[in-house]
Image (cartoon, coloured by chain):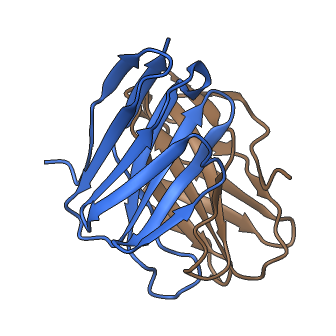
């Protein structure tokens, strides 16, 4: 079984709908992240969480919200989807690096392809 | 400001040859980590290799090595003995500062095509 899973893998929805993307991990990592990927722009961080009680905004959090239900689960919500939120969404996890110099490697889920019509 | 620059949108290499994918970065923080990820056509992001700013030696992982030139702020990925399965998008990324900083920035990527 994959260490980081995302559901759904593909979703087509309409403008104005509320959408939730879910991420689960079995790696035992405390840190979880949500990114979106657009062609030519690489990945951009939406939200991240250091532990269940910690939620932080990333580079592009507007229009999104998250919930950390448990150490292993981190959900991303689009409250009212719009077409420019059409993208590939990735969840990632990491554990604190032993040297403490930003070394914690992030491991990614398979991605969710979201299309907003 | 763009912190990670990958200047090669696409690269071609003959099977069994070596290829270098370029990455330059911009930071004033003396502590940072550099990462390379592979994204095959199936879409998943696969971690390849990591280099810390204080590491004295270039990182290596099997056929992957990172040519780290700190003064030039470059962190090029070298893939030796290319295989058809290496055809994919490759992303360079950097995280600055301590473990409490999760501002991981990615480059726009390089699409590598390995020719038989």
The letter of the brown chain is B
The spot of residue A11 in percent (x, y) is 35, 21
Q: Residue at x 65, y 62 (%)?
A: B94
Along the line of sight, the residue nearer the viewer: A8 or A28: A8
Residue B67 in sight: yes
**Residue A1 horizontal side relative to residue B17, left or right:** left
Q: Position of B26 compared to B96: left or right?
A: right
What tint does the image give chain A? blue
On screen, A103 above or below B60?
below
User: x, y (%) of residue B14?
Assistant: 57, 27
Image vertical order of residue B94 relative to residue B11, above or below: below
Where residue A48 appears, x then y in whole percent?
49, 61
- In the image, what residue occupies the spot 40% across and 17% down? A13
Q: Is residue A87 above or below residue B46?
A: above
A62 left or right of A89? right
In the displayed structure, B66 sits above or below A85; it is below
Tell me, yes or no, if residue B87 can be seen here.
no
Front-lying residue, A117 or B112: A117
Residue at position x 49%, y 21% in the image: A16
Residue A29 is situated, as x and y percent measured from the top left of the image, at 31, 70
Residue A39 found in image quarter: top right
**What residue is shown at x 44% (from left), y 61% (from top)?**
A106
């Amino acid at each position: 079984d994959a260490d980081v899973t995302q559901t759904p893998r593909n979703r087509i929805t309409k403008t104005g709908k509320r959408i939730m993307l879910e991420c689960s991990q079995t790696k035992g990592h405390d840190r979880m992240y949500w990114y979106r990927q657009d062609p030519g722009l690489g990945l951009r961080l939406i939200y991240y969480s250091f532990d269940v009680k910690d939620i932080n905004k990333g580079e592009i959090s507007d229009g999104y919200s998250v919930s950390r239900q448990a150490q292993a689960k981190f959900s991303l919500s689009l409250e009212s989807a719009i077409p420019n939120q059409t993208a590939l969404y990735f969840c990632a996890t990491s554990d604190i690096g032993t040297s403490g110099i930003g070394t914690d490697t992030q491991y990614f889920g398979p991605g969710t392809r979201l299309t907003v019509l | 400001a763009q912190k990670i620059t990958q200047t090669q949108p696409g690269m071609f290499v003959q099977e069994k040859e070596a290829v270098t994918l370029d990455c330059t970065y911009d930071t004033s923080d003396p502590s940072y980590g550099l990462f390379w990820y592979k994204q095959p056509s199936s879409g998943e992001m696969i971690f390849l290799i990591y280099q810390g700013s204080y590491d004295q030696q270039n990182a290596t992982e099997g056929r992957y090595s990172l040519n780290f030139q700190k003064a030039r702020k470059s962190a090029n990925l070298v893939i030796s003995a290319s295989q058809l399965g290496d055809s994919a998008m490759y992303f360079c990324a950097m995280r600055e500062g301590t473990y409490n900083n999760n501002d991981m920035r990615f480059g726009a990527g390089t699409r590598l095509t390995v020719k038989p």
